[in-house]
Amino acid sequence: MAGKQWTEDELMTVLGVYCRLTFGQLSQTNSLIKAVAERLERTPGSVAMKLTNLAGLDPAITGTGRKGLSGASSLDRKVWAEFSSGTDKWIPIIEARLQMLLSGEGHPVTYQSNAEADADFTGKDIEAVVKRRQGQRLFRDAVFTAYKSRCCITGIADTRLLIAGHIKPWCADKQNRLNPRNGLCLSALADRAFDQGMISLSNNFEIMVSL
């Protein structure tokens, strides 16, 4: 496997791994990295190295004084630039490719609608088609990683109570729907208050309250 060139498809998959892990987890002993390496027919060390190359391109890492590796290739830089630009092109593909790889399936992941129960007093159930936001899971993983799975307002760190909220609403800014930089990690209550315009954040990260 020495000298085996990375492909763009492989980098999409590895980006999915990168968004699920914290900087401290980018080790060849990590179980997710080992599973992906086996599927890609690469060593865990090579996948971990590629992840730390990507970390060296991530402002969320370098901006805090931490450093990844400096050996990012031109293809790494190209894929990272497109990924971080917030277009709708890459994230759904990355999410589907990683899921497909880990499931061992030889076909793309299909997105199925959920059955929604709308019960009346007689207990009757109906089925409804639910529209889902493709790529939302990876957006959530990326935002949670950036904020270390902690609400940026309340400090709550229980992921069952956290939401990856959009700064610019989904319907208002199509180009940045899946851009992690357009996200905030918030508790469910803080997210609701933010959506209703009851609270906001200044450019200095101060909480502003609307009375």
Image: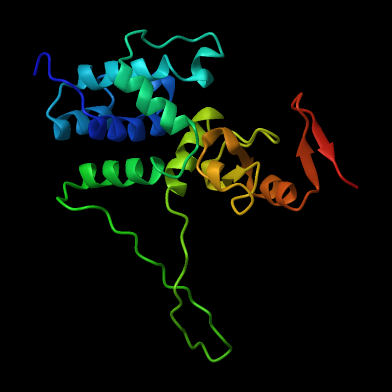
Q: In this view, does 195 lie above or below 39?
A: below
Horizontal placement of 69 versus 177: left or right? left
In percent of width and height, residue 67 lies at 45, 9
Please identify the residue farthest to the left as the structure is shown. Answer: 1
Quarter of the figure with residue 109: bottom left
Number of numbered discs: 0
Q: Tell me if I can see residue 27 in this picture.
A: no
Instruction: Determine the residue positioned at 33% across, 32% down.
Output: 17
Q: Tell me if I can see residue 129 in this picture.
A: yes
Instruction: Determine the residue positioned at 26% across, 28% down.
Output: 33
Quarter of the figure with residue 3: top left
Q: Quadrant of the N terminus?
A: top left
Q: Pick whichever, 47 or 25, lies toward us.
A: 47
Please identify the residue farthest to the right as the structure is shown. Answer: 211
Q: Pick whichever, 57 or 157, lies toward us.
A: 57
Colouring mode (rainbow / by chain / secondary structure / one colour)? rainbow
Q: Pick whichever, 58 or 145, lies toward us.
A: 58
In percent of width and height, residue 124 lies at 49, 88
In percent of width and height, residue 21 lies at 39, 29
Q: Pick whichever, 73 or 182, lies toward us.
A: 73
In percent of width and height, residue 19 lies at 41, 32
Instruction: Determine the residue positioned at 63% across, 41% down.
Output: 186
Instruction: Determine the residue positioned at 24% across, 35% down.
Output: 9
Quarter of the figure with residue 162: top right
Horizontal placement of 209 versus 201: left or right? right
Q: In this view, does 41 lie above or below 104?
A: above
